[in-house]
Image: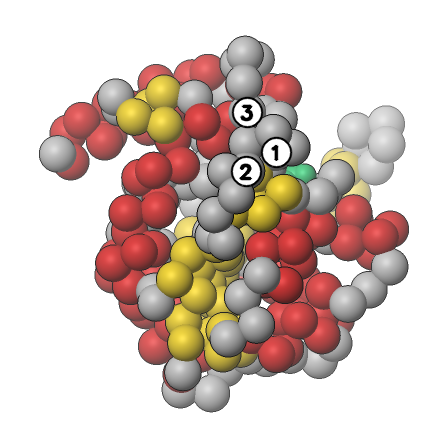
Amino acid sequence: MAVVGIVPAAGRGERLGSDGPKAFVACGGRPLVEWSLDVLESVCDRVVMAVPEGWDDGSEDRVVGGAVRSESVRAALAAAPEASIAVVHDAARPLVTRELVEACVAAVRSGWDGAIAAAPMTDTVKEADPERRVVRTLDRSVLWRIQTPQAFAADTLRRALDVPADVLAAATDDASLVEAVGGSVRVVEAPPENIKVTTPLDLEFAAALLRKRS
Ligand code: C5P
């Protein structure tokens, strides 16, 4: 049962305002993606990364990503036909822990099609119309903020990703595509530090947490 890590790292990171791709900006003294690679490599049999055009080095563990995130995931998964479990993890979450990856993989081994890292909702959440008039207040006790890692039965993920480009472009995570093909997905509570680096402030925060950890 090969467990393969899939790292979409092909985004340009425009919201970060960096010179190069977000996955390769320095964070805590090394390229951002390397923190995630270390953790995934400690759990998975192999890790395949989707990188921007010009960042592939000819190795079989690096493929050129697509125009949108899910296309990058599909390209990386296509390079790992041996995978029976795929663990998708964004380069943008350097504080992932080995325990969290293992918990997601264990849930898939126990029979779930997908197991995804998530944080309970601590803010009150409201729905607003286009004029920003509040329509309703949602019950936050059943809501989760979804993150990565997301582990899947690889064949189910392959089937879920076999959809037209516009469907892939609209998907904000891989689990939603697995749900759409009828897959069973459960949430796994993530530690609070599993933050996503999107803005320069996130980058500073992540670097401080990584320094504290090491
Ligand atoms: O842009 P966002 O932060 O949502 O991207 C999440 C992850 O998806 C990042 O690690 C980014 O590098 C990756 N990505 C990708 N291919 C794209 C767009 C984003 O691999 N075309």
| Quadrant of the rendered image containing residue 106 | bottom left
Callout 1–callout 3 Cβ contact below 8 Å = yes
Residue plotted at (36% across, 27% down): 31
Mark 1 is surrounded, within 10 Å at the Cα level, by few (under 14), some (14 to 19) or many (20 or more) other residues, namely: many
**Between 208 and 41, the one nearer to me in the picture:** 41
Q: Residues within 10 Å of mark 2 (few under 14, many from 20)?
A: some
Q: Where's residue 170, x and y in %? A: 79, 49
Quick one: label 3 or label 2, which is nearer the N terminus?
A: 3
* Residue, far front: 58
Residue bearing the label numbered 2? 56
Residue 138 visible, this orientation: no
The one of 93 and 134 positioned closer to us in this rendering = 93
Quick check: marks 3 and 2 in contact, CB under 8 Å?
A: no
Q: Is residue 27 visible?
A: yes
Residue occupying image coordinates x 18% and y 26%? 211
N-term-proximal mark, 1 vs 3:
3
